[in-house]
Image: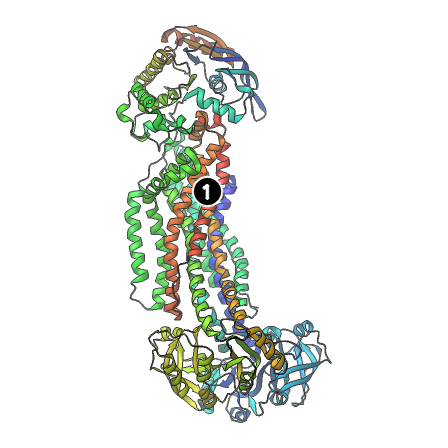
Amino acid sequence: MPILQAQALRKQYRLGEHTVHALAGVDFLVEKGEFVAIMGPSGSGKSTLLHLLGGLDKPSDGEVTLAGHRLSILNDNQATLVRRRNIGFVFQFFNLLPTLTAEENIALPLIIDGQDMRKHQARIAALLELVGLTDRRQHKPDQLSGGEQQRVAIARALVTEPAIVLADEPTGNLDSKTGTAIMELLRRSCDELGQTIIAVTHDPRAAAYADRAVFLRDGQIIQEIKGAGADEIGQRLRLIVNAMEELQL
Amino acid sequence: MSSTYLLAFRSLRARPARTLLTTLGVVLGVAVILAISITNLSTIDSITNLFNETSGKAHLAVISATTSDQGFPEGILSRLTTVPGVKVAIPSLQAQTMLADEAAQGEVSIFGVTVGGLTLYGIDPSLDRQAREYKIVAGQFLPLDLEAYDVVLVKDYADEKHIQVGSELEILTSTGVEVLRVVGLMSKEGPGQLNNGAFGIIPLRAAQEIFARLGDVDQIDVVATAQAASGAELDRLKSALQARLGERYTVVYPAARGRRLTQMLDIYQIGLNFFSIIAIFVGAFLIYNAFSMTVVERTREIGMLRTVGMTRRQVMVQILTEASILGLLGSALGVGAGILLSQALIWAYEFLLAQEVTQVHVPWDGLATSVAVGIFVTLIAAAIPAWQAGRISPLEAVRIRGSRRASWARRGLLLGATILVISYLTLYHNPFSPAIHYEMGRIAVFTMFVGATLLIPSTVGVWERVVRPWVRRIYGAEGQLGSRNTQRNELRTALTVAALMVGVTMILGIRGMTSAFEHDIRNWIEVYIGGDLYAYSSLPVPYDLGPRLEAVEGVAAVTPIRYFDVKWVQPDGDAQVLTFMAVDPPSYRRVTSFVFASSQVDPDRLLERLAAGDAVFISSVLSEKYGLQQDDTIRLATRRGERDFTVAAVVVDFYNQGLVVQGSWKDMRRYFGLNEAIGFMLKIQPGYAVDEAQSRIERLYGERRHLTIASNKALKSRVPALTTRSFSMFDVLAIIGMIVAALGVVNTLTMSVLERTQEIGMLRSLGMTRRQVGKMILAEAGMMGLNGAAFGLAFGLILSHLLLWALTALQGYELTYVLPTEGIVVGLLIALVVSQLAALWPARRAAGIRITEAIQFE
């Protein structure tokens, strides 16, 4: 049974007098423990797809089912609770709370859920260990490097043992070496913890860590490749971009 | 330069709410300063004008040097008319009466001004119009027959009492009812404004007969010749007349007679002047906050302007240009608001003086000062945001801005503490004279707030940690996230806390002052209105009524009371009008007692000293203000010349704002020629019901002697309400202060939500519900409210002490400091409630943030 299923997803926006078709009918499936990368040129709809999969937005048409929850029939509060307990998010710009320590930032979903952080010390410690920040647990974000902050964000995403982790350009704000370390961490969480991960990225090297790369163009999935390396993924992406440019000409 | 203005106008127009908020800050400061200036000037002008108009064309007035309660022989007219420079001398007699069919209207305010009744001037109809203008609107002016029992009334009064031309008017005198014929009605202008229009004129002889004052006049108005009518010549004429008349008479400019009324306003002016400084601070805070917010919002825009070549200086000038536009706009609107606000203050003054303020003047210098202050304060308040804007890098146009970590906490702690120490020294250890001390003190109040504001950032973290468990209990875990947010932008938090602090300070300062007054006045009234009943009349009552009242069944003792004005000749030659309260010491001690300033006295011995004569008690206000002690002497002008009276004791007495001396009935008869009482205090025998005795006396003497019998309990119960009304104008200012504080909270939290849009989007994506987001913002506001309340409590108590000090130093009022517990509770509650109410909109805005927009928000 897939952990995540999207059927005929459509999303339209009004931009002044124009209607933008961000997604034009997407069918998408993710199995438990899978690591999927979503790629595409700018404006292809990859971030929109991620937002819909994560219940951050509602589709104009179609359905998303996550861990047995049909997201379209949930009201805002219900969707929020589903997110809280079933989805972990990793953002491009880390988005840690500057007033909390690394340890507290990791525990943030639990705090929001009204749980006592002290009851989850073992889990938090394990995650700190996983991300290699045990000795930085009491540091605040402004005392951490970009890579360290993103690792805290990953640990935060994992703390509730979510059904799925959604990462939006997780290496977009990092140098290549740090980016590599982050992707290795995500890969490890998938391999060691069986975590299901979907990552939106424009970087073929990041996408190479995934089990499968899905390519979007003009709001539709046009290709998928499995187990490809960075070079092949990069080549496919270039072909897609070139094809788009030829069409526009 | 034109592009600067173009950008400035566009920017202001693009943010109407922000523009309005900033303008409001300027409007507030300008309005308060101007309102106070208008009110003070208008009130003084009205009173001066009133006395000028009643004197009309008269250039000088001759009055008794001793007391205003008795006249002087009209024979001195012949001495006046022969003095070169005198064109005509116009006599008049002034009497207070009431209509026979009305109960006594007199309401004794705590400031010793009796209102109501009917004021009648006995005039010479052939001469008086050379001095005064009477606009007759019905009937005719008085006939030339000086003995005719005719009267001309003010039309407004006549209409109110349903009196017409041709009616008969029955008035009360000390000997009974007299009948006058109404021959005309005048408009409420000029002298018609006296006693708020309850005024009339009758022929002089008739007045002298009716009021048993044959041969007496109370005032002679002098119209000077053209050559002597002004300047140095008028001064010479005044001196010549004084020399001709001698020390038993005083020659004055007509307007000087208004001083007695205007001196009642001194207390209010002290308080209002303090609060005008606070208004400037609050206004400046609002302006700073609003400009700060604008700069934050426009960081990317400003970064872009820097990218295309705008220098730092040009950016600063841009912001300051916007500030100057708002300063001008706010000042212009502030002038209008100030005129409106002055109406409220003038209403309060009218209540205090029991006289209409008819002259509303907008003083040019007050206008210029308030506008200048408005523009200046706007520029100063916008200076820091302008400087910060100038520091924005062009890179801000292309990157996510990080939160700038301010090091205000460390710097502010030192600077704030220094400023507070200097303020403290200025306030409490100032070697200068009271007048200079007072002015420095006003500025020190402002610097005290600045110092406290700088200290606040250092305390935020401490507060947050102390209060955190409570925050969690009330707002949940998300509340803790909110309370921690107060530490993120220390300066912005400090300014919001400061605004709340000022609001609470104003509430506490006012409550402290009011509590002290209420406490001391209540204690004083408790003893002052002694005995069980008070029998009084608007007219003087024969002294022999006292024994008759004592003979009534159930009455244990009766003592007479009389008040009249007396001139105190001070050592430097200046004269001050005081109230002389005459008592009969032996009977006084049987009914009530004085409240002596010192507890180490023998009251019986002191009363015996008073009874022996040539001695007075003085009020603690006089003692404090003029440094007078027991056994000193004061010189009073009497009918037998100036006499020294020994100060036998200092007593607590707030009558006539403390400008009162108490003397014996014997001395009043001997030196001032008066023997009638204005009222009697009665003590009822134990076992007798007070209300029964009251009814009995009313039946026997109420109508016959035109007495009103009031229970002292009823009289005392009116005092707290009077005190509250007297200070109500300050409550208006406190409310304004809290409204501005609330706007400050709204502004700060809106800015905070704006800066954290992405973060809030993240929290929502992690599973924080909208409700939890709202609670987070409310908790942040509650934290600031609590912090502001705590600081406000500390400084409010200081301000209340300060106001009382100012009253003591400048007016001689020595009041007991009473901890304003009600004010403390109210202030704390208001700060918390205001912070929560003000947070509702920002909380709603935060909760309504769309997640997808927020997480992509830059």
Q: Position of residue B780 (x, y in %)?
A: 42, 39
Task: Say if residue B858 shows up in the picture.
Answer: no
Q: Position of residue B845 (x, y in %)?
A: 50, 35
Residue furthest to the left: A135
Q: Position of residue B458 (x, y in %)?
A: 31, 44
Residue pointed to by mark 1: B747
Q: Nearer the viewer, residue B808 or B677?
A: B677
Judging from the image, the colouring scheme is rainbow
Task: Say if residue B709 shows up in the picture.
Answer: yes
Q: Position of residue B630 (x, y in %)?
A: 34, 80
Image position of B670 with respect to B691: above or below: below
Question: As shown in the figure, which amino acid type bears the numbered disc 1?
Answer: Asn
Left or right: residue A24 compared with residue B170: left
Q: Residues within 10 Å of mark 1 (few under 14, many from 20)?
A: many
Give the total number of marks visible in the rendering. 1
Helix, strand or loop at mark 1: helix
Q: Toward which corner of the image does residue B757 lie, by quadrant?
A: top left
Residue furthest to the front: B687
Q: Toward which corner of the image does residue B106 lie, by quadrant?
A: bottom right
For the point 48% across and 37% down, the residue is B843
Q: Chain of mark 1?
A: B
Q: Nearer the viewer, residue A80 or B547?
A: B547
Image position of B58 with respect to A242: above or below: below
Image position of B569 with respect to B597: above or below: below
For the point 55% across and 78% down, the residue is B535
Q: Toward which corner of the image does residue B387 lie, by quadrant?
A: top left
Image position of B124 with respect to A225: above or below: below
Residue furthest to the right: B166
